[in-house]
Image (cartoon, grey):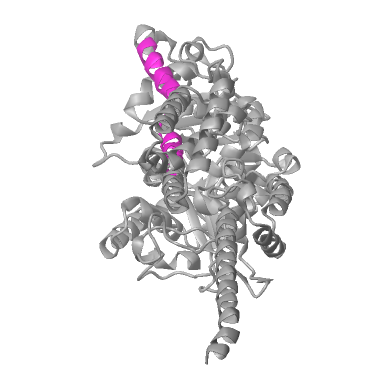
Amino acid sequence: MKGYVTLTAPPAKRRWKGVAVAVVLALVVFSMLVTLAFLLGLHNRLPYGYGSGDRAPSESGFRSFDHLDVVGGEEQQISEGEEARITNLVERFGHALDVTEDLTTQPEATPKSASKDTASYSEDLPSPQVELKKQPSKKAGNNEVSKKNPAQGSSRDETGKPCQVEFGSYCLWSSEHKEVMKDTTVKRVKDQLFVARAYYPSVAKLKHQEKLSREMKQNIQEHERMLSEAISDADLPPLVEKRIQKMDQTIAKAKASVSDCNNVDKKLRQILDLTEDEAHFHMKQSAFLYHLGIHTMPKSLHCLSMRLTVEYFKSPSLDREQSHGHKFENPNLHHYVIFSKNILAVSVAINSTVMNSAESGNIVFHIVTDRQNFFALKLWCARSSFKKAAIHIINIEDLDLEQPIELASEEFRVSIHASDQPSSLQMKTEYMSVFSPAHFLLPRIFKNLKKVVVLDDDVVVQRDLSPLWKLDMEGKVNGAVQFCRVRLGHLKSYLTDQNYDSNTCAWVSGLNVVNLDKWRELDVTGTYQQLLQNMKNTSSDSGRTTALPASLLAFQGLIYGLDDSWVLSGLGHDYTLTRDSIKHAGVLHYNGNMKPWLELGIPKYKKNWKNFLTKDERFMDQCNVNP
C-alpha cells in the first residue's frame, strides 16, 4: 500500500497544477478578448444606461448601438443604414475613443500567450480603419448625385434621410447655403470634453485619486467655459493649445486609473444619447423656423408698406388713377387682375408684363388688395413708371364681405403614391396653386368686363401676352395650364359624395384667361360656394384644406388647356429647372415656399425676378429692402 501511494501521488499533484495554470491562462486570454471586443465596438447590444438584466431596448424607450456579430469566424451582413451609422460614430468620436489604447491593462503586463491569442483573434475581425477610409468617397458620390438632381430624393440631410421626406425644400436650401467653418480645434475640444465627462464619475469614486479628480473637474470647467464663447476656431482664447495638452494628459491618467469599464461605457452612452436628442431637437427647431420665415412677411416689406402709407397722406396729389379712370371699365382694353398684399411682387409682375408688351397703351392692371396696403400701393404705383399702362387699386374690404378672405392664390403641397399601386410606400410631392376664395368674386368686382387675365403676384412675364386675348376658348370659362401629374382621383379622400371623373387633370393658377360672361352664365361662384359648404359639412378638415378640391371641381369640364410653353412652374421649390426651359418660357411662376423676395429664395432663379425690380427707390433703401 505504501508503495502504491508513493508511486501515484506525485503525478496527481502535477496534473492539478497543470490544470490550474491552464485555467489562469484561459481567464487572462478571456479578459483580453472582452476588452478588445469592447474597444472595437463588438459588445452586446444593450439599451443606454441599462445592464443586461434590465428591460429590453424596445421596452425601455432607449435606442441601442448597432453592432456587427462574428459567429464561427464568418461576418454577418449588416444593413446600409447600420453601416452608415457605425461609420458616422467612428468619424465623430474615433480620435477621442482611441482603439489602440487599453483602458484596463498595460502592454508590459500582458502575457505572451495572451498576446498571441489576441492577435490571432483580431485577424478575423473587420478593421474599422478600412471602413473609415471608404466612407468619404461614398459621401462624395452622394453629394455629386444630389447636385445633379436633388429633387429626385438623392439629396440627404445630416442624418442621411432624403430631403423631400424629412424637411422638404429646407434641406435643399441649407445644402445650397452651407458654409465651410474653420472649427477643427473647436471639435477637438468638444471631443475631449465628451471623453472627460465619461471618465470623471468613475475617477471621482476612486480612493486616493482626489488630486486627479480635482484636476479633471478643473479641466472640464475650463473647456466648458471656452465652448460657451466659441463657435469657430477664431473665437478660442490664445492658450487653447496648452489647455488641450493638459486635458490630454489628464485623460491619459484617467484611462490608466479606471479599471471598471462598465461605468465608462454607460456614461458614454448616456452622453451620446443626450447629444443626439439635442441635435434632433435643433433640426426640428430649424425646420419650424424655416416654415415660420416663409409664411411671415419680412420686416423690411412691412416697413416699406408703412412708410409709403404715411407718405401717401402727406402728398395725395400724386394719385395717377384720376387720369386713367375712363379705362377701368372699358371692355375693349386688355385687363389684367392681380390679387396681392405684396408691393414688391406686384411691382415686378406689372413691370415684366409692360416691358414685354408690344403695346402698353391698351393695358389696364387691377390690383386687388386689403386696407392695410391699399394706400401704400396707390402711392407706389403713382411714383413708378409703367409706360402707358393704367393702374387701378381696389380695396377688397370695400365690398362689405361677411368675413375676411385670403387674397393670394392658395398653394398646396400634395403627396401622392409614386405608382398606381395604393400599397406602394414610395411617395412623390407635387406643388400646386389654385384660385383662392377672393378669385371667385371676379364677376362681382368687374361687373362691366367680359374677359380678364388673372396673374399671380409671384410671376415674371417674359413674353407679350396680347395673343391671349385672341384665344377661342370654345365656350370654356377658365384658360389654364393643366397639371396632369395630379388628377382628381388622387384627391378622392377629399371628394366624398361628389361626382367627378377621376382621370381629369388638375389645373394650376399663375396665368389664367377668364371668360367672365360665361362665368356669370354658369354661376361658377355659386357652384364653388355650394361645394365648399358641402365639404365642410361632411368633413372635419379645415376650410383651407377643402379649398383645393372645391376650386378644382368648380371648373370641372370648364377648363381650356393652355399650351405648356406659356407657363413654367416650380421656381419656388424645384432646383432642377434648366436655363433653356427658363429662357423659352412665356411666364415664370415662383410657386412654392422659396419666393424670390425672401432670403430663402433659390439664388439661381432670383436674377430673372430682380431684372424687373424697381431701382433707386429711397423707401426701399430706408427699409433695407434687398431681396
Q: Which residues are magenta?
A: 284-311
Residue 469 percent location from the top left of the image: 60, 42
Name the residue located 59 percent from the left edge and 70 percent from the top edge: 22
Name the residue located 32 percent from the left edge and 54 percent from the top edge: 529
The one of 397 and 39 positioned closer to us in this rendering: 39
Q: Report the residue that reaches farthest toward the top.
A: 314
The number of discs equals: 0
Reply above or below: 449 against 4. Answer: above
Q: Report the residue that reaches farthest toward the bottom.
A: 1
Residue 355 percent location from the top left of the image: 65, 26
**Magenta-colored stretch includes residue 381:** no
Residue 565 percent location from the top left of the image: 68, 47
The one of 355 and 450 positioned closer to us in this rendering: 355
Q: Report the residue that reaches farthest toward the left.
A: 402
The one of 514 and 148 positioned closer to us in this rendering: 148
Q: Is residue 386 visible?
A: no
Q: Quadrant of residue 201?
A: top left
Q: Is residue 205 visible?
A: yes
What secondary structure prevails in the magenta region?
A: helix
**Magenta-colored stretch includes residue 292:** yes
Q: Quadrant of residue 186?
A: top right
Question: The C terminus lies in which quarter of the figure?
Answer: top right
Residue 72 percent location from the top left of the image: 65, 75
Reply above or below: 501 against 597. Answer: below
The one of 618 and 216 positioned closer to us in this rendering: 216
